Image (cartoon, helix red, strand yellow):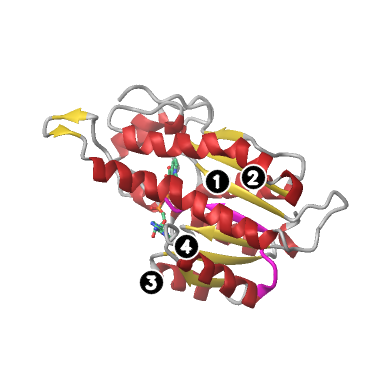
Amino acid sequence: MKIPTSTIIVTGGASGLGAACIRAVVERGGNAAIFDLNAEKGQALADELGKQVIFCSVNVIEEESVRNGIAATVAAFGEIHGAVNCAGTGDAGRTVGRDGAYPLERFQKIINLNLVGTFNVTRLVAESMQGNQPTTADGERGSIVNVASVAAIDGQIGQVAYSASKAGVVGMTLPIARDFSKLGIRINTICPGVFMTELMGMAPQQMIDGLAANAQFPPRLGDPAEFADMALSLIENTYINGETIRLDAGMRMPPR
Ligand SMILES: NC(=O)c1ccc[n+]([C@@H]2O[C@H](COP(=O)([O-])OP(=O)(O)OC[C@H]3O[C@@H](n4cnc5c(N)ncnc54)[C@H](O)[C@@H]3O)[C@@H](O)[C@H]2O)c1
């Protein structure tokens, strides 16, 4: 899948890692659709980047909302060739903490956004992609990138809901790749370490240094542009499929 001739949807594209992907698609000459709940930030980014980008007000956990976003993207650019599922969030709490057992509704909320939302977009985007004209002699029609976290593997104290949701994203990667094999659609997952997004930019330097100390080389937090580079490489390289990649400078998270 070549970015300059592609249209890529990025959920959570108004902010952080998703916004970096939107910028990278545009820099490389492709078209991009921001699927995000945050209309103010999403529309501002689309306005800044010009006619290669549209903003779609989408809630990834709602079927109709995602279908409307897909229809708007197809109407604007024709086919959809790629998707990066960045919409997600965290929640901190121990399984049993000072205030008692972790509330079930908080656990379900995180699973619903990070895991069910990712699956919802994946299934509906792939349904649209299956009607694409193949772009290669192999019959490639689309490429999807999911975003998990190193917490899927080295979950820390207080990360039970987040880790479970991201481990679900890792776990569904291979079976979805197998489900898609006859459709010519690939799917891969990135497990980012800690990236220097706007939110992290507001953290005290001591905390940033402490997190960076968990990395091997380079001993720093990731640059969102490095994440975008990996996501677009996974979209472009036709031979990678069903894979989960850590992008973390060799970081291994300790229990706390
Ligand atoms: N930043 C990091 O260091 C890091 C590390 C590991 C994993 N991740 C994962 O990467 C992804 C992006 O993280 P980020 O730091 O860029 O986050 P962020 O908070 O900067 O951006 C997330 C975006 O998702 C949007 N969003 C939230 N709920 C939504 C919904 N229901 N429908 C549509 N959009 C919704 C938000 O409005 C926001 O724009 C997340 O899944 C996160 O878990 C991030």
> Marks 2 and 3, how far apart in space?
30 Å
Residue 116 picture location, percent across and down: 44, 48
Q: Quadrant of residue 50?
A: bottom right
Residue with the most extreme right position = 137
How many C-alpha atoms fall within 10 Å of the one at disc 1: few (<14), some, or many (≥20)? many
> Marks 4 and 3, how far apart in space?
22 Å
How many C-alpha atoms fall within 10 Å of the one at disc 3: few (<14), some, or many (≥20)? few
Say what amino acid the circle numbered 3 marks.
Glu
Marked residue nearer the N-terminal end (4 or 2): 4
Dots 3, 1 in contact, CB < 8 A: no
Q: Nearer the viewer, mark 3 or mark 1?
A: 1
Residue 81 forms part of the magenta stretch: yes
Residue 113 picture location, percent across and down: 39, 50
Asked if the beta carbon under badge 3 is closer than 8 A to the nearest atom of ligand 1, the reply is no
147 and 217: which one is in front? 147
Q: Which residue is mark 2?
A: 187
157 and 49: which one is in front? 157
Q: Which residue is mark 1?
A: 146
> Marks 4 and 2, how far apart in space?
20 Å
- For the residue labelled by badge 1, is the local secondary structure a helix, a strand or a loop? strand
- For the residue labelled by badge 4, is the local secondary structure a helix, a strand or a loop? helix
In the image, taking residue 162 as reference, residue 117 lies left or right, namely right
68 and 254: which one is in front? 68
Q: Which residue is mark 4?
A: 63
How many C-alpha atoms fall within 10 Å of the one at disc 2: few (<14), some, or many (≥20)? many
In the image, taking residue 183 as reference, residue 89 lies left or right, namely left
Q: Which residue is mark 3?
A: 40
- For the residue labelled by badge 2, is the local secondary structure a helix, a strand or a loop? strand
Q: Quadrant of residue 230?
A: top right
